[in-house]
Amino acid sequence: MKRGFTLIELVLVLGIMGLLVSAVGLNFKAVSAYQHRTETRALARRIRTARSTAVATRSTVSVSFREDGYTVQGQGPYRLPQGMHLTSNVSEDLQFNKYGIPSIEGKARTLTITYQGQSIVITIAPVTGKVTTKL
């Protein structure tokens, strides 16, 4: 009686292992893309909440941005997961006055969250303060 595996058995085992490894790799990318969208939606939601708070309390509410996260007045700071980066087309903090109007002069403010070469843009309208997300 010989001991060992046949060539067919080895090829089958290696093929199954290859399929399992590729499935795990694809699933990891899907989770990363999901987390990217989730973080972007969370930021957009917090900006909308800051605007609503400014109107409800009839006071100014500010949101400050950094490359690795952001802070909403009275909350945070919120850090983005490792590998995600936040950029803004304006360097100063975003402020909503008691009417919910943002401190933006003339043009929309854009925030971009980048992860693994993919970017998602949040836009804040200059007069209305409306927050939109472009996924």
Image: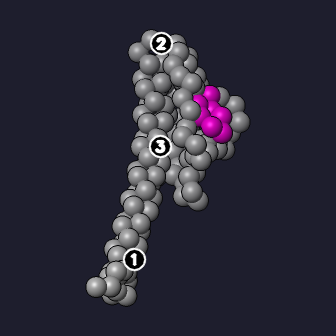
For the point 65% across and 34% down, which residue is it?
A: 66
Provide the major secondary structure of the magenta segment.
strand
Task: Say which quarter of the image contains residue 93.
Answer: top right
| Amino acid, disc 2 | Arg
CA gap, disc 3 to disc 2? 27 Å
Range of magenta residues? 63-70
CA gap, disc 1 to disc 2? 66 Å
Residue under label 2, please give it.
Answer: 58
Query: Along the polypeptide, which appears first: circle 1 or circle 2?
Result: 1
CA gap, disc 3 to disc 1? 40 Å
Placement of the C terminus among the 4 image quadrants: bottom left
Label placed on residue 40: 3
Task: Say which quarter of the image contains residue 38.
Answer: top left
Residue 108 showing in the rendered view:
no
Position of residue 121 measured from the top left corner of the image (x, y, whole percent) = 53, 49
Image-based side of 98 in relation to 94, left or right: left
Element type where label 1 sits in the image: helix
Image-based side of 29 in relation to 86, left or right: left
| Amino acid, disc 3 | Thr
Label placed on residue 14: 1
Query: Along the polypeptide, which appears first: circle 3 or circle 2?
Result: 3
